[in-house]
Image (spheres, grey):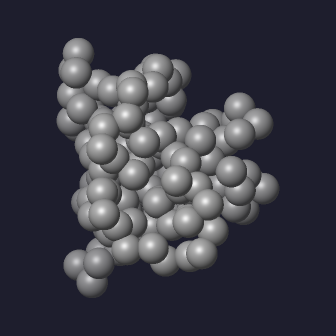
C-alpha cells in the first residue's frame, strides 16, 4: 500500500551530503546519514565499514541519536560519498528503522525524483519485532 507523499526535508539531505563530503574519506567511512528528531534537531553519523560487516550509517545514527537524547526520529536520509547522492537503506536497515521508529519517513530517490516515504512502504508485509508496532499502523 502506497501512502501519500510527504514533503522532502532538503535541509536534512544537505546535512547528510555535507557529512559525506567532509567526513567520509577512505574505505572505512563511505556513507553518511542524517535524521531529524521530533524536537527539530538534526543528528548525523557515518558508517563504519569493515570486511566482517560493520554497521551502516543509519544504524550508527540510531546510537548517535540516543547518545544525544533524541529517541524519536521523524525523518532519515543516507547519502553516499564521492557525490553519489541519496542512497536508499539496505534491507537490514529498513527492518531496524521500522522496528525502532514505525512512523519514520525515509528520503529515497535520485536527483529530481527524490521523495519522502513512510518506512512501512519500503518494507511491506514485514516481520513484527515488537508489540508496539501493532499500534503504529
- Is residue 55 shown above or below 137? below
Taking the image as drawn, is residue 56 in sight? no
Locate residue 27 relative to residue 117 in the image: left or right: left
Q: Which of 98 and 31 is in front in this view?
A: 98
In the image as oriented, which residue stretches furthest toward the top? Answer: 112
Locate residue 18 relative to residue 91 in the image: left or right: right
Name the residue at 45% across, 36% down.
16
Q: In which quarter of the image is residue 87?
A: top left
Name the residue at 23% across, 15% down.
112
Locate residue 83 relative to residue 132 in the image: left or right: left
Name the residue at 29% across, 78% down.
53
* Quadrant that contains the N terminus: top left
- Is residue 43 shown above or below 4? below
- Is residue 132 shown above or below 18? below
Report x, y in % for residue 18.
44, 31
Taking the image as drawn, is residue 102 in sight? yes
Name the residue at 53% across, 39% down.
75
Report x, y in % for residue 20.
38, 40
Report x, y in % for residue 99.
51, 66
Q: Nearer the viewer, residue 71 or 49?
A: 71
Report x, y in % for residue 35.
55, 42
Q: How many labels does the image show?
A: 0
Amino acid at each position: 500500500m502506497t501512502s501519500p507523499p510527504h514533503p522532502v526535508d532538503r535541509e536534512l539531505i544537505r546535512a547528510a551530503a555535507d557529512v559525506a563530503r567532509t567526513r567520509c574519506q577512505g574505505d572505512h567511512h563511505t556513507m553518511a546519514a542524517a535524521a531529524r528528531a521530533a524536537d527539530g534537531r538534526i543528528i548525523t553519523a557515518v558508517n563504519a565499514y569493515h570486511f566482517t560487516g560493520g554497521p551502516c550509517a543509519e544504524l550508527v545514527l540510531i546510537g548517535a541519536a540516543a547518545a544525544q537524547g533524541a529517541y524519536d526520529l521523524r525523518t532519515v536520509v543516507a547519502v553516499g560519498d564521492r557525490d553519489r547522492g541519496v542512497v536508499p537503506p539496505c534491507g537490514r536497515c529498513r527492518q531496524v528503522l521500522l522496528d525502532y521508529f514505525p512512523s519514520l519517513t525515509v528520503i529515497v530517490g535520485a536527483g529530481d525524483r527524490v521523495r519522502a516515504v513512510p518506512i512501512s512502504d519500503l518494507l511491506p508485509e514485514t516481520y513484527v519485532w515488537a508489540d508496539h508496532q501493532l499500534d503504529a499502523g
